[in-house]
Amino acid sequence: MRIAVHGLLWGNGVLHMKTTANFGERLLSESVSAAEDGRPVDCLEVPDAAALNAKLAQENARLARERDLLRMVIDNLPDYIYAKDKQGRFVLNNQAHAEDLGAKSPAEMKGKSDGDFFPRELAEQFRADEQKIVATGEPVVNQEQYKSRPGDRSGKKRWSVSSKVLWRDADGNILGTVGITRDIHEIKLAQEALRQSEEKLREFTTQLEYSNRELQDFAYVASHDLQEPLRKIVVFGERLKEKSGESLAAESRDYLERMQKAAARMQTLINDLLAFSRVTTKAHPFAPVDLAEIAHEVVNDLEARMEQVKGRVEIGGLPVIDAEKLQMRQLLQNLIGNALKFRKPEEPPVVKVAARKFSDEAGRELCELTVSDNGIGFDEKYLDRIFNVFQRLHTRGEYEGTGMGLAIVKKIAVHHGGDITAKSKPGGGATFILTLPAAHSKNKETHNE
């Protein structure tokens, strides 16, 4: 060990002797002092060389471990990490960045600049960004770029996003810039695909709304305009039957009866079309509706039919919900009426109406209304079909109707922000399940669509 004395310094009555001990490549500074009375000490106590070397070795090992950990982290990140000096030359890169720029290893990139890998215009843009960072200290954050990768010979461009910050040492001196770039090409493609899908969906929704308005207008106008000529057919048919019915031949009377029955069916169909179109075109604001009261009114209206088929309707506890009263009445009348109609010939129909309130995951209070029966049921493979307009699972000779009843129920449910489904099997009865919001916001009002 070599000890060199650099000078003597007095301070606070203490003589400080600064020495340096040279251990290979590292300088270890030590200070020793004389006695407080200023007398020199007899000898200098210098730490043991072996202890100093051991301490130095531990420190070097710690730094090596930290360096290796940092290197492992940046080399295993999929993002491109790099550091440049103030002249724009690479001093650090991770493996992902080296491969992206077509280099075999980070070591191959040291001392090179963006001009060695990118087109001149792009390299100058990067250099300008970094010079601005050095001059102002302001970072570049999330700068999106669409460029070809130097390591990709196909020349295809990809989207990436970069952020760069100022690089300073412990004393605050500016050394250069540090940056990180992430490939976001797949994300951008997904975002673009989503944007296009949303745009197409908006266009489709607009077209669908327009078509629905046209269909509703057509249904209303056509049904309304057909009422008068149909009424004349019915009236003149009745007059012909009254005045000349006895004198008509049997075949002519048969034709007249068929005409009158067809006119009656047409009148029912027109009325159903009007009811379907009025669900939205003639809607009224929602208000508290007592479903129990509505259900009992419907049962009273159907009393004659119930006596005819010897059926009964059991009404459970039904709540009060925000709805349109007339539409709720129509909904229950269609469902209970269907339950009485599609009965088993050998068994009196029993219809049960029940409801319960519950909250969904979003905390909304909902009402589940069920109408079940012991009738003929249906195959659930036809579940979607039965709620469409003019759809029937049976012939008109088997069961009367226009195929509009459940379509109207479905439209009323949707208009109230709900939905309807059913559970059934052939010969096992059916249960229709409606889910409706129990309450609507105070400022929510229905309107013509």
Image: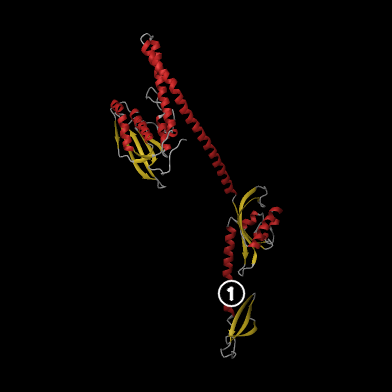
User: What colouring style does the render use?
Assistant: secondary structure
Determine which quarter of the picture holds residue 2: bottom right
| Residue sitting at x 58%, y 58% | 76
Observer-nearest residue: 414 or 103? 414
Identify residue type, mark 1: Leu
| Residue sitting at x 54%, y 42% | 198
Observer-nearest residue: 230 or 162? 230
- Residue 95 position within the rendered picture, expressed as x and y whole percent measured from the top left: 62, 58
Farthest residue in the right direction? 120
| Residue sitting at x 51%, y 34% | 210
Up the image or down, 430 lies above or below 253; here it is: below
- Residue 139 position within the rendered picture, expressed as x and y whole percent measured from the top left: 61, 59
Observer-nearest residue: 291 or 117? 291
Q: Is residue 57 left or right of residue 404?
A: right
Determine which quarter of the picture holds residue 129: bottom right
Residue 16 visible to an observer of this rendering:
yes
What kind of element bears circle 1?
helix
Residue 391 visible to an observer of this rendering:
no
| Residue sitting at x 31%, y 33% | 297
Q: Is residue 110 left or right of residue 142?
A: right
- Residue 223 position within the rendered picture, expressed as x and y whole percent measured from the top left: 45, 26
* Label 1: how many Cα within 10 Å (few below 14, some 14–19, many 20+): some
- Residue 67 position within the rendered picture, expressed as x and y whole percent measured from the top left: 59, 65
Q: Which residue is mark 1?
A: 56
Observer-nearest residue: 434 or 237? 237
Determine which quarter of the picture holds residue 132: bottom right
Up the image or down, 302 lies above or below 365; here it is: above
